Image: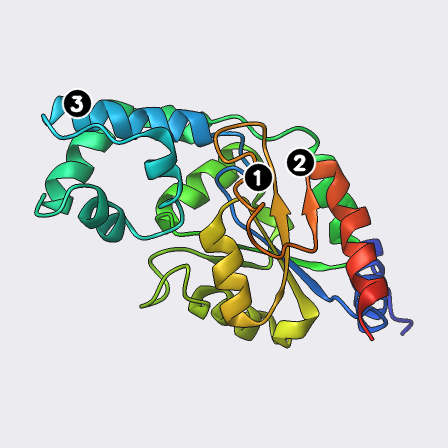
Amino acid sequence: MSAVISLNSIKIIEGALIRNNRKIKAVIFDIDGVIYDDNKELIDYQKKTAQILGLRIPSDIEIFRLFGKSWTEIIDQLWPGVDSEEYKKAWFKLVGDKLDYLPLNDRVRETLEKLKKKFILGVVSGGHRDWILVRFKNDSLTDFFDVIVSGDDTEKHKPNGEPILYACQKLNIKPEECVYIGDNIIDYEAAKDADVHFIGFIWDGIEHGLFDNIQLNSRVYSFREIPKEIEKIEKNIM
């Protein structure tokens, strides 16, 4: 009996062969501000929740610099002594299901399709797993990613490198074979702590210039620039 190999199986084999010959084997993304163009909305929701609860209203940059940390860490740093569960209830009551339909950045889907042919893809985020899965399902993104690490999956969170290292472990790759893409200083610090390559994603918002005071070798200003930036990183690997 002759073996029948499906077209999908052939693509999987071809992808594995391509990855085996590459210095970078995996590309891992932060979600908010990178895959989704949602930082402005998320900052606004935090400020409105603080107003509802009669709390001090932080500046945009105060809030943004904490993105990627766990809920408890964010609340403890912005409003010491505030009950995190009470705050979260007020936040979700305000936001409702609007979080499930936040806008994607430009060219996300076509760029992920291009990258998927050459690399293993994953995400590492401080957000709740259920929320991530709902958003990815709504936007038909789930199948692009081989690993999804949420804030629920590790004891430590960014800027600690544990979530990224956990993703590398799940993907069975070495840290030096991975690129992490994030839009915040804590993403850079987490990548550095995990000893993976890092690409800073710069959007035209409050954090424009946020990376200026650190030694950032790789940066992009749009999602479609990512494949070429990864090629540059590979060329510089000895």
Q: Position of residue 172 (x, y in %)?
A: 61, 76
**First reached walking from the N terminus: tag 1 or tag 3:** 1
Badge 2: how crowded within 10 Å, few (<14), some, or many (20+)?
some
Q: Is residue 56 left or right of residue 131?
A: left
| Residue marked by disc 2 | 108
Badge 3: how crowded within 10 Å, few (<14), some, or many (20+)?
few
Which amino acid type is shown beneath numbered disc 2?
Val
Residues at discs 2 and 1 in contact (Cβ within 8 Å)? yes
Distance (Cα) linking label 2 and label 1:
7 Å
Residues at discs 3 and 2 in contact (Cβ within 8 Å)? no
Residue at 26 percent across and 26 percent down: it is: 47
Choose top left, top right, bottom left or bottom right for residue 233.
Answer: bottom right
- Residue 29 visible: yes
Check the picture and name the quadrant holding the N terminus: bottom right
Q: Position of residue 127 (x, y in %)?
A: 37, 47
| Residue marked by disc 3 | 51
| Residue marked by disc 1 | 35
Which amino acid type is shown beneath numbered disc 1?
Ile
Distance (Cα) linking label 3 and label 2:
34 Å
